[in-house]
Image: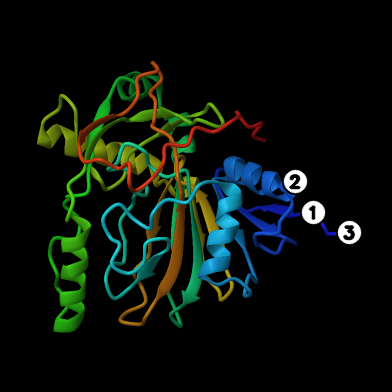
């Protein structure tokens, strides 16, 4: 008889390690439910010693938790099912929630370590649920009636300062592909999580501005709210080892890949799972301004509200 997964809590607001489980397509439904419930409760969960997994195995396991999306809405030159997180092209060292520029941000992402630097290269996650819960009442009143414009044509990484021409060219080509199709979506700043019913902040570096506010006002308010999200008490930082897999609830987190490994090579493989269209506290959904994400992802509405402990 196989052992049940063991959940080891790592932080008060975010993070847990799941032990005694071998990830793969052959997991039974009880174990899959335990993993999904741990994801909802702890926002990001980590699995050590999954050396047996390759890209196909990672994708097969992901299908037990949901419906995989294409690798990315626009970046498909290096694979349609799995996105390589490759330090030669992009280091994602800015706080963000994945793919919020479309109307259907992913439910979750699964990231597997492939090649790691000798030092550095950690990843940090933050709980946007904890950030909301800690807001004082005047800010709650503001953000629950606020919407933001998210776009893939964002300000981060517009300059390429690497003196190595090949690396700079690779980064530039990645950037050009990233914005090859234009997406803009108006999302609520506070969304209701579709599985837990909890309220979470929906922000990150794809935000261009807040609807109804000017550029300066938007920037000031964005920094104030982001500072709430990224308080150290609301974060967990993971030091990768060979065989590690991380899964995070993309609807209740932001993350940041720490670029502190000089010019060493770092590569991880990411699978994303289809999500729903965010809805605000008044029941109003997100609104497409530009772009059609139907090819990238189905809209998947969860079947149940989970009991989260």
Q: Which residue is mark 3?
A: 1
- Residue 166 to residue 293: above or below: below
Name which residue lies at 17% across and 56% down.
Answer: 180
Say few, some or many: other residues with alpha carbon within 10 Å of mark 2 (under 14 / 14 to 19 / 20 or more): few
Q: Quadrant of the N terminus?
A: bottom right
Q: Which residue is mark 2?
A: 30
Q: In this orientation, which residue lies closer to the viewer: 10 or 85? A: 85
The answer to whether any part of residue 121 appears in the image is no
Name which residue lies at 34% across and 18% down.
Answer: 141
Q: Quadrant of the C terminus?
A: top right
The answer to whether any part of residue 13 appears in the image is yes
Circle 3 — which element? loop
Dot placed on the residue nearer the N-terminal end, 2 or 3 = 3
Q: Tell me, what colour scheme is on the image?
A: rainbow
Q: Which residue is mark 1?
A: 4
Q: Position of residue 259 (x, y in %)?
A: 34, 69
Q: Is residue 265 left or right of residue 75?
A: right
- Which circle marks residue 274 in the picture? none
Inter-mark Cα distance, 1 to 3: 9 Å
Say few, some or many: other residues with alpha carbon within 10 Å of mark 3 (under 14 / 14 to 19 / 20 or more): few
Q: Mark 1 against mark 3, which lies toward the viewer?
A: 3
Q: Position of residue 74 (x, y in %)?
A: 26, 55
Q: Position of residue 110 (x, y in %)?
A: 50, 57
Outermost residue to the top: 282
Task: Say which quarter of the image contains residue 283.
Answer: top left
Circle 2 — which element? helix
Say few, some or many: other residues with alpha carbon within 10 Å of mark 1 (under 14 / 14 to 19 / 20 or more): few
Inter-mark Cα distance, 2 to 3: 13 Å
């Amino acid at each position: 008889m196989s052992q049940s997964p063991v959940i080891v809590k790592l932080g008060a607001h975010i993070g847990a390690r799941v032990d005694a489980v071998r990830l793969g397509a052959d997991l039974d439904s009880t174990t899959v439910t335990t993993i999904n419930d741990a994801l909802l409760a702890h926002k990001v969960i980590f699995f050590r010693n999954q050396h047996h997994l390759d890209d196909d195995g990672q994708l097969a396991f992901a299908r037990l938790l949901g419906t995989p999306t294409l690798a990315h809405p626009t970046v498909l030159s290096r694979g349609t099912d799995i996105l390589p997180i490759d330090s030669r092209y992009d280091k994602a060292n800015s706080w963000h929630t994945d793919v919020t520029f479309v109307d259907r941000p992913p439910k979750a992402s699964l990231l597997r370590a492939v090649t790691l630097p000798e030092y550095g290269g950690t990843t940090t996650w933050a709980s946007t649920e904890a950030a909301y819960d800690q807001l004082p009442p005047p800010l709650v009143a503001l953000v629950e009636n606020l919407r933001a414009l998210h776009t893939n044509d964002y300000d981060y990484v517009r300059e390429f300062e690497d003196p190595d021409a090949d690396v700079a060219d690779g980064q530039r080509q990645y950037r050009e592909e990233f914005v090859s199709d234009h997406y803009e979506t108006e999302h609520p700043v506070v969304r209701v999580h579709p599985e837990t019913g909890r309220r979470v902040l929906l922000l990150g570096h794809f935000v261009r501005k807040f609807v109804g506010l000017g550029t300066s006002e938007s920037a000031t308010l964005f920094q104030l709210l982001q500072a709430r999200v990224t308080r150290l008490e609301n974060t967990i930082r993971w030091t990768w080892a060979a065989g590690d897999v991380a899964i995070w609830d993309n609807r209740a987190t932001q993350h940041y890949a720490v670029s502190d490994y000089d010019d060493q090579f770092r590569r991880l493989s990411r699978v994303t799972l289809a999500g729903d269209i965010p809805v605000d506290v008044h029941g109003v959904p997100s609104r497409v301004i530009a772009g059609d994400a139907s090819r990238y992802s189905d809209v998947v509405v969860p079947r149940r509200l989970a009991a989260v402990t």
